[in-house]
Amino acid sequence: MCALLIVAGATYGLLKISERYPAVYASFKYKTGVGGLLLLFLAGEVTILFRMFWQCAFFLVKLNSMHAPISDKMIILFFPIATVLLTVTILYQITVKRCPSAVAFSIVSLWVSGPVFMQLQGWFYSMPVPANVLLQVLGWTFVWTVYLVVSPRAALTYGTKRAKHYL
């Protein structure tokens, strides 16, 4: 319950910040700005961010008790920290930026921080990624990629080329 309140509060804060930045295009037919499914996307990314923070904290506690060189400890933290940085950047791009590159950067970051990092982790640690976990991550990434590419709200808010079809 506490985690739900944290995610809801953070998402609400991002929504309020995003309201300060108008959409690139306005439309009478379609809604613009951060809202609807775009708000759900933000909530999901906030959830991922807090999960990665939790994972980093867990690793730090466990690694503190290990007798290993600091370089070995940092390697273990590389993927979670990189995911945190990419997720923070996605949240910034979607919340504050109002240009087509925000959508493009968010899509690339979704794929890198999700399926690509997951496969690299599995390869690096010589541990296969469970199929159900990989399918969940691929599903999340694919659904939001399609949404960001074809959504009238995203196109009008960020001024992508597709926005001209909705004006």
Image (tube, rainbow, N blue to C red):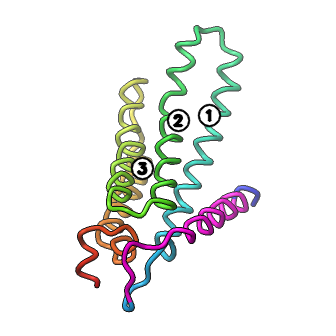
Q: Quadrant of the C terminus?
A: bottom left
Secondary structure of residue under mark 1: helix
Q: Are the residues flagged by discs 1 and 3 in contact, CB closer than 8 Å?
A: no
Q: Position of residue 132 (x, y in %)?
A: 42, 50
Q: Position of residue 111 (x, y in %)?
A: 35, 48
Separation of residues labelled 1 and 2 (CA atoms): 6 Å
Magenta segment, which residues?
A: 4-27
Q: Are marks 2 and 3 in contact (CB under 8 Å)?
A: no
Q: CA distance from mark 2 to mark 3?
A: 20 Å
Mark nearer the N terminus (2 vs 3): 2
Q: Amino acid at mark 2?
A: Pro
Q: Mark 2 or 3, which is nearer the eye?
A: 2
Q: Nearer the viewer, residue 65 or 103?
A: 103
What amino acid is labelled 3 in the image? Answer: Asn
Disc 1 residue type (three-letter):
Cys
Which residue lies under the disc numbered 1? 56
Residue 8 occupies quadrant: bottom right
Residue 122 in the image: x percent, y percent?
40, 31
* The disc label shown at residue 80, or none: 2
- Tell whether label 2 touches label 1 (CB within 8 Å): yes
* Residue in the picture at 59% in, 54% down: 47
The residue singled out by tag 3 in the image is: 132
State yes or no: residue 8 in magenta: yes
Is 101 drawn above or below residue 67 in the view shown? Answer: below
Of the numbered discs 1 and 3, the one sitting upstream in the chain is 1
Which residue is at the far right? 2
